[in-house]
Amino acid sequence: MNASRHPLSRWAFGLGLVTAPITCGLFVLAACIGASASGWGYALGGVLLSLGLLTKPWRTRRGLARAGLGLIVAVAAVRLAVADGPRVHTERMPAPGTRYLNRLVDERDGTLVAAHALLLARRLPASDTAGFIPALESAFDRLAREEGPVATPAIATWLGLQSPESFDTVVITPEHPSPDTAVVMLHGFTGNFTVYCWQMARAARAISARTVCPSVGPRGDWWTADGARTLEQTLAWLKGQGIRRVYLGGLSNGAVGAHVLSSRVAQAGMELRGLVLISGAERRASTPAVPVLFVQGTRDTMMPARIARDVAARLGRRATWFEVDSGHFAFLDRHAACEEAITTWLLRLEGRASR
């Protein structure tokens, strides 16, 4: 039988017609966003696989398809083995465990694709996104240099797998962790990203606190019943680890959630040391009886600075205000200043000298 007419050859060619546009598109995306090493590995493997499937006669040229498939499997195997570690670790709660699918794709790749798509669709205000993409790229470069490959809860989040009964949490532990102090950070809209948690952890390590960032749905709606229950489960886990003192923080929707849910820390039998509200606050929330740090971009139109200013005015001396010339993504494009402000505030509350 002619090899090109063999049923297996026809099946392979048909599959190649389906995969080729997808893999070529991914290859172009990898070039456009400056993909990670694993992203390039997946893209190249996909192109090789598709070319092998489309090559006739397939039975005599299938080595190309095997090479492509082998490269994809090798990249996945490496990420499964190394994309999680003792310092930056993604854990499933409340029952112990891990979701290995969160290790398969580099957070940089998916996030940059989504960011470009949102900008092209004009879903983000132009006044808030000047320098947004370069700031994201810089953040991921810094994360990769300092921590290497890491897992991301974003994959499971967008697959709808987060619930109070089973949710992914990024746990970042400093070299010499405090036995009783932690910073809990609630994520914003679009989901939980390791890079934001890591930035908070860079400030929190000044007081040797571990940083814990739980996941709710992609909306970051912490004020819902599921959001409140997820925070309660996180606090219960921390209490089981010996943590007794908590700083509660949040970014954007997470800042609103932290503000609204701040009383849950005391209800869990722990001491709330203070709130860190980054690019967000809630006017209608009850006034917390602890110090609050506001980190805000002057040009923020998504969570306008005037809302946080009103809340800060009500708090009086308990409020510390830090404002930078930026939009909603101040924590990214003014990361050094924001991290330093959080570090200084934490050290002051802990009664330590600033570094």
Image: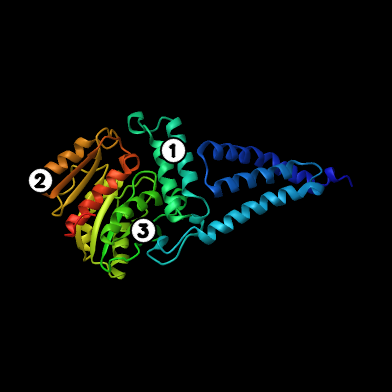
Of the numbered discs 3 and 2, the one sitting upstream in the chain is 3
Residue visible at 52% across and 46% down in the picture: 36
The crowd level at tag 1 (other Cα within 10 Å; few <14, some 14-19, many 20+) is some
The residue tagged with tag 3: helix, strand or loop? loop
Above or below: residue 298 compared with residue 145: above
Assign the C terminus to one quadrant of the image. Answer: bottom left
In this rendering, would 300 be left or right of 98? left
Of the numbered discs 3 and 1, the one sitting upstream in the chain is 1
Tell me where residue 310 appears, x and y as whole percent.
Answer: 15, 39
Residue pointed to by mark 3: 164
Given the current orientation, which residue lies at the most extreme front position?
Answer: 355
**Nearer the observer, disc 3 or disc 1?**
1
Residue type marked 2: Gly
The crowd level at tag 3 (other Cα within 10 Å; few <14, some 14-19, many 20+) is many
Residue type marked 3: Pro
Mark 3 → mark 1, Cα distance in angstroms? 27 Å
Mark 3 → mark 2, Cα distance in angstroms? 35 Å
Residue 286 in sight here: yes
Residue visible at 13% across and 54% down in the picture: 289
Mark 2 → mark 1, Cα distance in angstroms? 37 Å
The image quadrant that residue 332 belongs to is top left
Tell me where residue 225 appears, x and y as whole percent.
Answer: 30, 53
Residue pointed to by mark 2: 316
The image quadrant that residue 307 belongs to is top left
Residue pointed to by mark 1: 115
Tell me where residue 106 appears, x and y as whole percent.
Answer: 50, 50
